[in-house]
Amino acid sequence: MNQPMAIDELVSVAQAEAMGELDAPMMAIVLSSEQSYDLPINSLETDADKARWGLILRAAREHVEADAVAVLYPAWTTIRHKKPENETADAAGATREDNAEEAEPSDPIDTLFVQLHTRDHVYWRGFEQIRDPKHQRIIGFRRIKALSTDYKRDEAPSVTAWLSTLFEPLPDEGEETEVDRELADLLEEPEVSAALYPRQMRALH
């Protein structure tokens, strides 16, 4: 998988899914070598939600032997930014989106995040959602450079910790743990089993 190309393609998918909507959908895409599988995510608000979906995505990834999982979700974000040293700073291209490690928080930004998790890296892209002032539907996106970073997997921010087990190896053959029994149960849930169809096949139903 060409990972830089993959993250660009995922950005296109995420933006297409959100365009014209009041709220961008939360979803995961499990990327196997042959097909892509969608799992709509109903909530990531609590630690319990994240723990449950971390297990679901690990189970789905193992089930189809995928090497990558993408997570697409909206969130309100604040960025810390420095005041320009002089009044010409903005003209020189110093915008609040370009400065991640800044002194003062900005107003919250209505953000669409796209994350691609592989065995070695986490690719992260953030976009401000532009809305129609009258109807509040999403009509476009503006990339936020401060929220667009690539990390080595062991250096990823703590906010991604709920996906830390995504690529943990399976137990030795014949060995079964409580977690594995829970994963097996999750694969029987309708929302998971129904999602494990290729995107192209589900489009026909």
Image (spheres, rainbow, N blue to C red):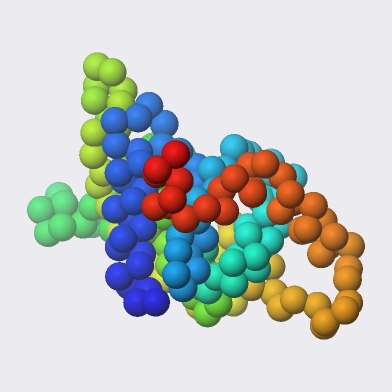
Give the x, y percent position of residue 178: 89, 62
Relative side of 190 to 91, left or right? right
User: Is 103 rendered above or below residue 118?
Assistant: above
User: Is 46 rendered above or below residue 160?
Assistant: above
The C terminus lies in quadrant: top left
The residue located at (50%, 69%) in the rendering is 32
Front-lying residue, 122 or 35: 35
User: Is 195 rendered above or below residue 25?
Assistant: below
**One can see residue 193 in this view:** yes
The residue located at (40%, 43%) in the rendering is 204
The residue located at (30%, 62%) in the rendering is 8
Relative side of 7 to 164, left or right? left
Give the x, y percent position of residue 48: 74, 45
Give the x, y percent position of residue 74: 45, 41
Front-lying residue, 168 or 39: 39
The N terminus lies in quadrant: bottom left
The residue located at (24%, 25%) in the rendering is 132
Give the x, y percent position of residue 169: 71, 78
Q: Quadrant of residue 64?
A: bottom right
Relative side of 55 to 135, left or right? right
**One can see residue 164 in this view:** no
**For the view shown, which residue lies furthest in the bottom direction?**
172
